[in-house]
């Protein structure tokens, strides 16, 4: 069987980029059970309520929903169990010290396969205020309108 290469996205947390200012990102491995891997290969997972908590010297991913494998038997996993993250000790220590500051949290951004191995991209984030969210939406809308105006002007020049 040929070895997988490249990156295959499984799930993405778009709401996190809307609700938080992303300060720093990390790529981590996951400790998974066999049926979890099979379920992820089917492309089913949800990162919406997920967060990372550091207990002692280990990082744990909580509330990420990986549905039960449909062909699984008594060996199936529970859908929302906590999963251990594989990170270097230096990274865990850095995250722990920064996440203890007021308003900081660690959220998952994406879940994907990289060269056949399950990875999760986590981010140190600071919560946005309501006016920040409105400002971000306004900037995004202004950028979209400017792009439309530019493309319309190009079309008029050609035709």
Image: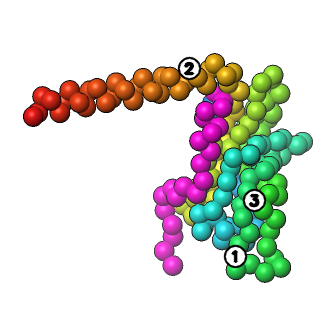
Q: Position of residue 47 (x, y in %)?
A: 68, 49
Estimate the spatial distance between the alpha carbons at disc 1 and disc 2, rounded to whole Å.
43 Å
Q: Residue at x 63, y 39 (%)?
A: 15
Of all residues shown, which one is farthest toward the right? 56
Above or below, 48 against 77 in this view is: above
Estimate the spatial distance between the alpha carbons at disc 2 and disc 3, rounded to whole Å.
38 Å
Q: Position of residue 87 (x, y in %)?
A: 73, 46
Taking depth in this image into account, of 83 and 17 the one nearest to the observer is 17
Estimate the spatial distance between the alpha carbons at disc 1 and disc 3, rounded to whole Å.
20 Å
Q: How many residues crowd mark 1 within 10 Å: few (<14), some (14–19), many (20+)?
A: few
Q: Is residue 136 left or right of residue 85?
A: left
Residue at disc 2, secondary structure: helix
Residue picked out by circle 2: 135
Identify the mark at residue 81; answer none if there is no mark.
none
Check whether the beta carbons of the residues at disc 2 and disc 3 lie within 8 A of each other. no
Q: Quadrant of residue 41?
A: bottom right
Residue picked out by circle 1: 70
Residue picked out by circle 3: 31
Q: Residue at x 64, y 27 (%)?
A: 21
Q: Position of residue 31 (x, y in %)?
A: 75, 59
Residue at disc 1, secondary structure: loop
Q: Quadrant of the C terminus?
A: top left
Above or below, 3 against 51 in this view is: below
């Amino acid at each position: 069987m040929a070895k997988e290469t490249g990156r295959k996205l499984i799930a993405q947390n778009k709401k996190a980029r809307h609700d938080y200012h992303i300060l720093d990102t990390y790529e981590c491995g996951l400790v998974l059970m066999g049926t979890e891997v099979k379920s992820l290969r089917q492309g089913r997972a949800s990162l919406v309520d997920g967060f990372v908590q550091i207990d002692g010297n280990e990082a744990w991913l909580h509330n990420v929903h990986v549905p039960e494998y449909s062909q699984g038997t008594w060996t199936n996993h529970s859908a929302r169990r906590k999963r251990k993250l594989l990170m270097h000790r230096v990274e865990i220590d850095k995250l722990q010290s920064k996440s203890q500051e007021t308003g900081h949290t660690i959220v998952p951004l994406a879940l994907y396969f990289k060269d056949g191995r399950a990875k999760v991209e986590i981010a140190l984030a600071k919560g946005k205020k309501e006016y920040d969210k409105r400002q971000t939406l306004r900037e995004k809308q202004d950028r979209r309108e400017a792009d439309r105006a530019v493309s319309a002007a190009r079309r008029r020049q050609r035709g």
